[in-house]
Image (cartoon, coloured by chain):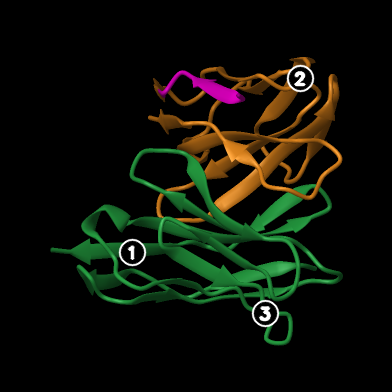
Chain colours: A orange, B green
Amino acid sequence: SQTIHQWPATLVQPVGSPLSLECTVEGTSNPNLYWYRQAAGRGLQLLFYSVGIGQISSEVPQNLSASRPQDRQFILSSKKLLLSDSGFYLCAWKIAISYNEQFFGPGTRLTVL
Amino acid sequence: GNSVTQMEGPVTLSEEAFLTINCTYTATGYPSLFWYVQYPGEGLQLLLKATKADDKGSNKGFEATYRKETTSFHLEKGSVQVSDSAVYFCALSDQGKLIFGQGTTLQVKP
Protein backbone atom coordinates (compact mmCIF):
# COMPACT_ATOMS: atom_id res chain seq x y z
CA SER A 1 0.00 0.00 0.00
CA GLN A 2 1.01 3.59 -0.48
CA THR A 3 2.07 5.92 2.30
CA ILE A 4 3.12 9.55 2.39
CA HIS A 5 5.43 11.08 4.95
CA GLN A 6 6.15 14.66 5.88
CA TRP A 7 8.72 16.10 8.25
CA PRO A 8 9.14 17.79 10.44
CA ALA A 9 5.68 17.70 12.00
CA THR A 10 6.16 21.04 13.72
CA LEU A 11 8.62 23.84 13.11
CA VAL A 12 9.20 27.24 14.71
CA GLN A 13 11.54 29.50 12.79
CA PRO A 14 12.61 33.15 13.07
CA VAL A 15 11.88 35.64 10.31
CA GLY A 16 14.66 35.64 7.74
CA SER A 17 15.78 32.07 8.37
CA PRO A 18 15.80 29.37 5.66
CA LEU A 19 13.25 26.60 5.33
CA SER A 20 13.25 23.05 4.07
CA LEU A 21 10.23 20.77 4.34
CA GLU A 22 10.38 17.27 2.97
CA CYS A 23 7.73 14.94 1.62
CA THR A 24 8.26 11.35 0.51
CA VAL A 25 5.87 8.81 -0.95
CA GLU A 26 6.21 5.03 -0.70
CA GLY A 27 4.56 2.26 -2.64
CA THR A 28 4.00 3.99 -5.96
CA SER A 29 6.01 5.19 -8.94
CA ASN A 30 5.93 8.41 -10.92
CA PRO A 31 3.22 10.07 -8.83
CA ASN A 32 2.05 13.62 -9.29
CA LEU A 33 3.09 15.56 -6.19
CA TYR A 34 1.57 18.69 -4.66
CA TRP A 35 2.34 21.27 -1.96
CA TYR A 36 -0.53 23.14 -0.33
CA ARG A 37 -0.64 25.78 2.38
CA GLN A 38 -3.49 26.20 4.80
CA ALA A 39 -3.45 29.47 6.70
CA ALA A 40 -5.28 29.63 10.03
CA GLY A 41 -9.04 29.43 9.53
CA ARG A 42 -8.75 29.38 5.75
CA GLY A 43 -8.95 26.93 2.92
CA LEU A 44 -6.20 25.21 1.00
CA GLN A 45 -3.99 27.07 -1.43
CA LEU A 46 -2.10 25.06 -4.02
CA LEU A 47 1.51 26.25 -4.07
CA PHE A 48 3.36 23.88 -6.38
CA TYR A 49 2.84 20.67 -8.25
CA SER A 50 5.13 18.28 -10.08
CA VAL A 51 4.49 15.64 -12.73
CA GLY A 52 8.03 14.29 -12.75
CA ILE A 53 11.62 14.63 -11.54
CA GLY A 54 12.81 18.20 -11.95
CA GLN A 55 9.42 19.39 -13.24
CA ILE A 56 7.86 22.03 -11.02
CA SER A 57 4.85 24.23 -11.69
CA SER A 58 4.20 27.22 -9.47
CA GLU A 59 0.64 28.27 -8.86
CA VAL A 60 1.21 31.56 -7.08
CA PRO A 61 4.19 33.92 -6.91
CA GLN A 62 5.67 33.82 -3.43
CA ASN A 63 8.66 33.53 -1.19
CA LEU A 64 8.83 29.76 -1.55
CA SER A 65 10.27 27.31 -4.04
CA ALA A 66 9.94 23.58 -4.62
CA SER A 67 12.15 20.85 -5.97
CA ARG A 68 11.77 17.21 -6.89
CA PRO A 69 15.21 15.62 -6.83
CA GLN A 70 13.88 12.04 -6.85
CA ASP A 71 10.74 10.40 -8.16
CA ARG A 72 9.06 10.15 -4.78
CA GLN A 73 10.61 13.11 -2.98
CA PHE A 74 9.22 16.63 -2.96
CA ILE A 75 10.89 19.50 -1.09
CA LEU A 76 9.54 22.91 -0.19
CA SER A 77 12.13 25.60 0.51
CA SER A 78 12.66 29.23 1.29
CA LYS A 79 15.83 31.28 1.56
CA LYS A 80 14.32 33.83 3.96
CA LEU A 81 11.07 33.22 5.79
CA LEU A 82 8.44 35.91 6.22
CA LEU A 83 5.81 36.14 8.96
CA SER A 84 3.19 35.47 6.30
CA ASP A 85 4.75 32.07 5.57
CA SER A 86 3.27 30.70 8.79
CA GLY A 87 0.69 28.00 8.21
CA PHE A 88 -0.01 24.33 7.86
CA TYR A 89 1.79 22.80 4.88
CA LEU A 90 0.36 19.72 3.27
CA CYS A 91 1.92 17.46 0.70
CA ALA A 92 -0.23 15.25 -1.50
CA TRP A 93 0.18 12.71 -4.28
CA LYS A 94 -1.99 11.13 -6.89
CA ILE A 95 -1.68 8.57 -9.64
CA ALA A 96 -0.49 10.27 -12.77
CA ILE A 97 -2.67 10.24 -15.86
CA SER A 98 -5.88 10.02 -13.89
CA TYR A 99 -8.60 12.30 -12.67
CA ASN A 100 -8.82 10.59 -9.36
CA GLU A 101 -8.30 11.68 -5.83
CA GLN A 102 -5.20 13.03 -4.15
CA PHE A 103 -3.86 11.51 -0.95
CA PHE A 104 -2.54 13.81 1.71
CA GLY A 105 0.28 13.62 4.19
CA PRO A 106 -0.04 14.49 7.89
CA GLY A 107 1.19 18.06 7.39
CA THR A 108 3.82 20.36 8.87
CA ARG A 109 2.83 23.18 11.20
CA LEU A 110 5.17 26.12 10.54
CA THR A 111 5.27 29.13 12.83
CA VAL A 112 7.44 32.06 11.83
CA LEU A 113 8.23 34.46 14.68
CA GLY B 1 -12.45 29.34 -14.21
CA ASN B 2 -13.63 26.36 -12.21
CA SER B 3 -14.62 26.95 -8.61
CA VAL B 4 -16.27 25.38 -5.58
CA THR B 5 -18.53 27.12 -3.09
CA GLN B 6 -19.40 25.67 0.31
CA MET B 7 -21.83 26.83 2.92
CA GLU B 8 -20.38 29.02 5.61
CA GLY B 9 -19.67 27.46 8.96
CA PRO B 10 -19.40 26.62 11.68
CA VAL B 11 -22.27 24.17 11.72
CA THR B 12 -23.22 23.13 15.24
CA LEU B 13 -25.44 20.09 15.75
CA SER B 14 -26.49 17.83 18.56
CA GLU B 15 -25.54 14.18 18.43
CA GLU B 16 -27.86 12.08 16.22
CA ALA B 17 -29.04 15.13 14.26
CA PHE B 18 -29.25 15.14 10.47
CA LEU B 19 -26.39 16.82 8.64
CA THR B 20 -26.33 18.64 5.33
CA ILE B 21 -23.34 20.63 4.10
CA ASN B 22 -24.03 22.36 0.82
CA CYS B 23 -21.53 22.41 -2.01
CA THR B 24 -21.99 23.87 -5.47
CA TYR B 25 -19.50 24.06 -8.26
CA THR B 26 -18.74 25.84 -11.51
CA ALA B 27 -16.90 23.83 -14.11
CA THR B 28 -16.44 23.30 -17.79
CA GLY B 29 -16.64 19.68 -18.75
CA TYR B 30 -17.39 16.88 -16.31
CA PRO B 31 -15.07 16.94 -13.31
CA SER B 32 -14.88 14.34 -10.58
CA LEU B 33 -16.17 15.58 -7.23
CA PHE B 34 -14.82 14.83 -3.77
CA TRP B 35 -15.44 15.37 -0.10
CA TYR B 36 -12.44 15.44 2.21
CA VAL B 37 -12.43 15.58 6.00
CA GLN B 38 -9.77 17.15 8.21
CA TYR B 39 -9.59 16.33 11.90
CA PRO B 40 -7.79 18.82 14.17
CA GLY B 41 -4.07 18.95 13.55
CA GLU B 42 -4.16 16.35 10.79
CA GLY B 43 -3.98 16.16 7.02
CA LEU B 44 -6.98 15.65 4.76
CA GLN B 45 -8.62 12.29 4.33
CA LEU B 46 -10.77 11.37 1.36
CA LEU B 47 -14.30 10.81 2.62
CA LEU B 48 -16.09 9.99 -0.63
CA LYS B 49 -16.09 10.73 -4.33
CA ALA B 50 -18.26 10.66 -7.47
CA THR B 51 -16.91 10.60 -10.99
CA LYS B 52 -19.97 11.22 -13.13
CA ALA B 53 -23.46 12.69 -13.04
CA ASP B 54 -25.97 10.89 -10.79
CA ASP B 55 -23.21 8.91 -9.04
CA LYS B 56 -23.64 8.64 -5.30
CA GLY B 57 -20.52 8.47 -3.18
CA SER B 58 -20.83 7.03 0.31
CA ASN B 59 -18.60 6.19 3.24
CA LYS B 60 -18.99 5.92 7.04
CA GLY B 61 -22.65 6.91 6.83
CA PHE B 62 -21.96 10.01 4.73
CA GLU B 63 -23.45 10.37 1.26
CA ALA B 64 -23.29 12.85 -1.61
CA THR B 65 -24.86 12.71 -5.06
CA TYR B 66 -23.36 14.31 -8.16
CA ARG B 67 -26.14 16.56 -9.47
CA LYS B 68 -25.23 17.97 -12.84
CA GLU B 69 -28.51 19.82 -13.32
CA THR B 70 -28.01 21.82 -10.12
CA THR B 71 -24.17 21.67 -10.18
CA SER B 72 -24.22 20.46 -6.59
CA PHE B 73 -22.62 17.79 -4.43
CA HIS B 74 -24.18 18.20 -1.00
CA LEU B 75 -22.85 16.10 1.88
CA GLU B 76 -25.41 14.37 4.10
CA LYS B 77 -25.44 12.10 7.11
CA GLY B 78 -28.52 10.81 8.84
CA SER B 79 -27.19 10.77 12.40
CA VAL B 80 -24.01 12.57 13.35
CA GLN B 81 -21.70 11.62 16.20
CA VAL B 82 -19.34 13.69 18.32
CA SER B 83 -16.48 11.99 16.50
CA ASP B 84 -17.68 13.57 13.21
CA SER B 85 -16.55 16.99 14.46
CA ALA B 86 -14.05 18.17 11.85
CA VAL B 87 -13.61 20.45 8.86
CA TYR B 88 -15.16 19.21 5.62
CA PHE B 89 -13.88 20.25 2.20
CA CYS B 90 -15.65 19.87 -1.11
CA ALA B 91 -13.39 19.67 -4.17
CA LEU B 92 -13.42 19.09 -7.90
CA SER B 93 -10.76 17.79 -10.25
CA ASP B 94 -9.34 20.22 -12.78
CA GLN B 95 -6.63 19.03 -15.16
CA GLY B 96 -4.77 17.02 -12.58
CA LYS B 97 -5.30 19.49 -9.78
CA LEU B 98 -7.96 19.80 -7.12
CA ILE B 99 -9.94 22.95 -6.54
CA PHE B 100 -11.22 23.16 -2.98
CA GLY B 101 -14.01 25.02 -1.32
CA GLN B 102 -13.21 27.05 1.77
CA GLY B 103 -14.17 24.26 4.14
CA THR B 104 -17.04 23.95 6.61
CA THR B 105 -16.41 23.34 10.28
CA LEU B 106 -18.79 20.88 11.92
CA GLN B 107 -19.16 20.77 15.69
CA VAL B 108 -21.26 17.99 17.15
CA LYS B 109 -22.26 18.34 20.79
CA PRO B 110 -23.23 15.39 23.01
Residue B47 vs B110, above or below: the answer is: above
Dot 3 corresponds to which residue? B67
Give the percent coordinates (x, y) of residue A40. Answer: 41, 49
The CA span between labels 1 and 3 is 23 Å
Check disc 1 and give the amino acid type.
Leu
State the residue in front, B2 or B32: B32
Check disc 2 and give the amino acid type.
Arg
Q: Does the magenta stretch include residue A5?
A: yes
Query: Disc 3 on helix, strand or loop?
Result: loop
- Pointers 1 and 2 within a single chain: no
Tag of residue B106: 1
Tell me which chain the residue with mark 3 is part of: B
Tell me which chain the residue with mark 2 is part of: A
Q: Residue furthest left?
A: B110
Query: Disc 1 on helix, strand or loop?
Result: strand
The magenta span reads A1-9
